[in-house]
Amino acid sequence: MLYWDYAAAAPPYDEVVQTLEQVMRQHYANPSSLHRAGTEADKLIKRAREVCAAALDVQPKEIMFTSGATESNNLAVKGAALQYQSRGRHIITTELEHPSVYESCLQLQQLGWEITFVPPDSSGVVDPSRIAAAVRPDTVLVSVMHVNNEIGTVQPLQEIGRQVKAVNRRTLFHVDGVQGYGKLETRLKEWQADLYSLSAHKIRGPRGTGILYVREGVTLFPLLTGGSQEMGNRAGTENVPNIVAAAKAVRMSGERRQEFSTRITPFKKRLEDYISGIPELVLNSRGDGAPHIVHFSYPGMKGEVMARRLEELGMAVATRSACSSRLAEPSRVLLSMGRDRAAALGGIRISLGDSHTKQDVEQLEQALFAAVQSLKIAEGGVK
Ligand code: PLP
């Protein structure tokens, strides 16, 4: 089976697995304990914070560890909304966001916040001026993802940051960087990002650990209360092995970004050209999108049916993002781009990783061709 679902979860680096085992065995003490074993575990967290800070070109005290990007995004959105409600209760986000941002905003809406959901254009990119036009004196937060997890489009963060801050300097800018880190350059200062989320398991780290950059001077209303871990922002005993291994993945995938992108971009282009040549398929990803995501629809054919046929042919692909793939509803992202319901139900995401070779890509092309041919013949029966 060839694995084409790196955007859902990427296999951990060998070094990550070794680190996990080593830290789990040797540094099991609670980092809050005052004895030496505890302070050693605490030092490991401190070092991991420094490693992540160096990779993101920020200060160690601006790095927080969480249980994943879902938590990082929840904390960024709800933590900022609750903390700064005296400034206002208006938030701007996009219709492209991951459910962890989107649903957080919907939850706030139920509680009385006003949310502006800005749609993308037909190619899945948000116009910065549409975001800036929505900024008001009471806008406390703008949340925009770097790379869309379904179709891989890259959002113009620098321009969004610049225009938002020009209208309201106090509006915080949160970036969900999960699908961009390690694939594209991360420039938090140039984007004027105040908050930035990452997930370790998307960058070959362990699952169950996330990172949240919180710019110095920004405070968040904690969602988990109890102990004073993570500078009082997140209570709970730290997952030391995961934190150390996550920092390793952040460093390694950051260092390998250029090499990864150079190697993988021709594969993406080749697959996109191939898919464009199959009349039944509609390409949804763009040539200038993130190097690891290719997305297409087979309008009229459910994504699950196509995915199952590809699996029978030895290819593991996704119907959309992993967390929504069990939903029978059409993709919100594709609908927001103006695609019809048939196309939005028939999406397939192929996500590339370091292990892929030219031969793998050739095999995938053959499988795509065979899947479409066989589904065409069976059409009607399987829709
Ligand atoms: N944001 C984006 C863009 C994602 O793709 C994902 C995972 O699919 C998340 C957030 C959530 O990350 P995690 O799985 O670490 O909770």
Image (tube, rainbow, N blue to C red):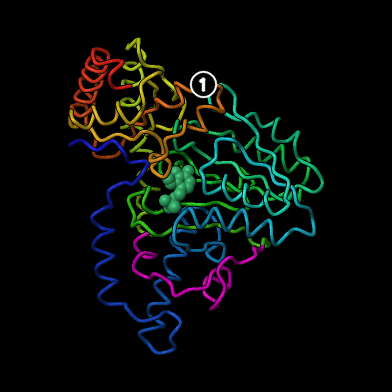
Task: Give the position of the C terminus as an image quadrant.
Answer: top left
Q: Position of residue 113 (x, y in %)?
A: 72, 50
User: Which quadrant, please, contains the N terminus?
Assistant: top left
Instruction: Pick the residue in front: 151 or 286.
Output: 151
Residue 297 in the image: x percent, y percent?
A: 40, 22
Q: Residue furthest bottom?
A: 35
Q: Is residue 178 visible?
A: no
Q: Left or right of 171: which side holds 94?
A: left
- For image coordinates 42% across by 39% down, the residue present is 327
Mark 1 residue element: loop
Image: magenta residue range: 219-246
Does residue 40 lie above or below 101 as drawn? below
The residue under label 1 is: 339
Number of residues whose C-alpha sits closer than 10 Å to that of mark 1, classed few (under 14), some (14–19) or many (20 or more):
some
Magenta segment: does it hold 268?
no
Q: Quadrant of residue 33?
A: bottom left
Task: Please identify the dominant SS of the magenta region.
Answer: loop
Q: Is residue 284 left or right of residue 312?
A: right
Residue lying furthest right in this view? 137
In percent of the image, x 57 and y 62: which residue is there? 62
- Count of numbered labels shown in the rendering: 1
x and y, in percent, of residue 45 in the image: 43, 70
Q: Residue at x 40, y 90 (%)?
A: 35
Q: Residue 179 falls in which quadrant of the image? A: top left
Residue 190, placed above or below residue 151: below
Q: Is residue 226 magenta?
A: yes
Position above or below: 20 against 32: above
The spot of residue 199 in percent (x, y) is: 43, 52
In this rendered view, identify the residue nearer to me: 102 or 92: 102
Residue drawn where x is 39% and y is 23% of the image: 296
Which amino acid, by three-letter code, is at mark 1? Arg
